[in-house]
Amino acid sequence: MKKILLLLAIIFLGTFSLQAQEETFDLKVEITGMYTDKGKVFLALYNSEATFLKKSEDTKGANAIVKDKRAIAIFKGLKKGEYAISLFHDENDNNKMDTKIFGIPKEPYGFSNDAKGFMGPPKFKDAKFIVDTNKTITIKVN
């Protein structure tokens, strides 16, 4: 009887611990539309409207090498939820987005869903997408 109770306790605890582990997913981002292979692409992944286009401890960053005018970045271990991406192609490889007067970007940039803004960047609601499986998205730079 003790062995049966012990076996049931082990099964119960094993099942409970498996449910406690949160499932995570990988996101592959394919970037297209570059005119040159020079430089690299910098990406930022945001998980909320409150942090969109802002520095935050929840913001994940990545960079990708451009080859054949395309680049690929991978974010691993993402929790299920809503996300949005902003990126730019640092063509001159100076590790920053170069801008013109009034902060207008000189270098190609893009957002998830190829979202566009009016007189500024797009809203989170236009750039957001759901991560609930391993997935691949494509973003074309402007």
Image (spheres, rainbow, N blue to C red):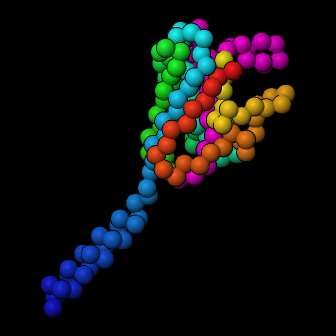
Q: Is residue 68 above or below residue 133?
A: above
Instruction: Residue 72: give x, y in percent of width and height.
Output: 48, 27
Relative side of 80 to 111, left or right: left
Relative side of 60 to 5, left or right: right
Q: Is residue 108 above or below residue 121?
A: above
Q: In this figure, what is the number of numbered marks?
A: 0
User: Residue at horizontal 50%, vertical 22%?
Assistant: 71
Camera-nearest residue between 131 and 13: 131
User: Dividing the picture into quarters, in which one does residue 47 lie?
Assistant: top right
Instruction: Residue 139: give x, y in percent of width and height.
Output: 61, 30
Magenta extent: 80-107
Instruction: Residue 125: give x, y in percent of width and height.
Output: 73, 45
Residue 107 appearing in the image:
yes
Q: Which quadrant is the C terminus positioned in? A: top right
Relative side of 112 to 123, left or right: left
User: Residue at horizontal 80%, vertical 28%?
Assistant: 120
Residue 52 appearing in the image:
no
Whether 104 is among the magenta residues is yes
Camera-nearest residue between 19 and 50: 19
